Image: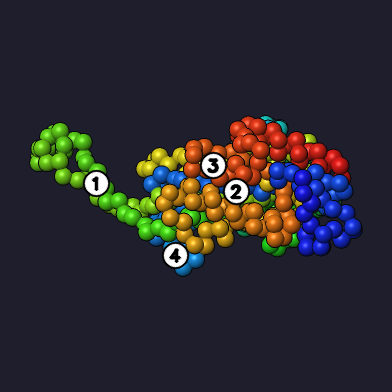
Amino acid sequence: MRRIPHVADGLFGSNGNFTVYGNRERTHIMSTTNRTIVEIHALETTAAANLNRDDTGSPKTVEYGGYTRARVSSQAWKRPTRMMFRDSFDASDLGVRTKHVVEILGDRIMSRDPEIGRETAIGIAECVLRDGAGIKLDKPRKKKDADDNADNDVSQSKYLLFMGNRQYDQLTDIAIDALGTEDPAKTVKSNKKTIKQIVMNDRSIDVAMFGRMVADDTDLNVDAAAQVAHAISVQAIEPESDFFTAVDDKQDRGDEDGAGDAGAAMIGQVEFNAATFYRYANVDANRLNDTLGDVAATAKAVSVFVRSFVSSMPQGKSNSFANGTLPDLIVVNVRDTQAVNLVGAFERPVEPDYVQHATEALVKRERDFDNVYGITPVKTWVVRIGQDTEAADSLVESPSTLKEMLEGVEQVVASRLNQE
């Protein structure tokens, strides 16, 4: 083993301690920091696809390093990542992101007490959310040709509100109790502090992970523990266009005038591209634990986020392109310094073979940062397929399976948080 200085403090750390490195898994003689940040780097080669469209229907792009690159926005990948949380957590541990907050609360009130009519339930739900929680509500714009008996008159929040299912359950309790009093509206207003606290104390896993922003009431904000970058292609791309036609089955069979005319009943075009993407995200485990207040839940949530992020796929035009792929390479680091996006490895577009050269560039970029800035990870895992990703083996003793990596991430995060 050799000694490497840590974070530009000379040979020794600022407190005179040094750190021993071995095969990129660092063993602290005395830890320099108790931060625990998990970062995910992935190289993923997609099929021909239109994963994420702009306002014209074209695949999103970005100019990077002087070249046009394919791009998938962070929002487009965050939603499928968050949806996969449903496979790992009970609904009570998760939240709902919607404007239909009054309708959701009203339905829960009626479900709890079927004798409460819909009009009463919606009325008290509005009161609890508006007068109690301070959430701004507004009547939705009436849709064209909508009937007057539909739920068009139910108020909605002026913004998408991300709130936990447990919060809805607790607000349901307050609403039903208020209905049992002589003046429900007055009862709600007298419990305003309690209601506001219920919404503020949201410990839903996905709310804690992805955050909540309420512009007109910052007390309701929840700092996101996860950061997700826009994915960009490692190579320069030129968008392509698919001209397509659709044939009328009945006309093609000769069942009407113009029999045997197999001409198209519809024509159109869709743009697409195919690329090897660099994908990056990180999770601040300390911040997540501050919100959740449970080390085991935090460690599991981090592991689930890693799995969901690398396994998910935006669904843009998925039926037309069947673009479900998985990464060629995944590198997961646990750092105690700061998160580092390695996208600079691809400022100069890589040449074919894209996966091989992108892997080599990524590994070089990480080693350069680690050596120059003294930020070698506490622990690294590599999950990879094929010979083109072999260069990543230099980051670890041996590659892992996805299952082994996820178990390792959960154990390391739990161990470090328990030492605080």
Q: Is residue 216 visible?
A: yes
How is this picture coloured? rainbow
Find the distance from the CA under tag 1 to the CA under tag 2: 39 Å
Per the image, the residue denoted by label 4 is: 67
Q: Position of residue 277 (x, y in %)?
A: 49, 51
Find the distance from the CA under tag 3 to the CA under tag 1: 43 Å
Residue 118 position by quadrant: top right
Q: Residues within 10 Å of mark 1 (few under 14, many from 20)?
A: few
The residue type indicated by label 2 comes to: His
Q: Earlier in the sequence, mark 1 or mark 2?
A: 2
User: Is disc 1 in contact with disc 2, using a CB cutoff of under 8 Å?
Assistant: no
Per the image, the residue denoted by label 2 is: 41
Q: Which mark is residue 390?
A: 3
Find the distance from the CA under tag 4 to the CA under tag 2: 22 Å
Q: Earlier in the sequence, mark 4 or mark 2?
A: 2
The residue type indicated by label 1 comes to: Thr
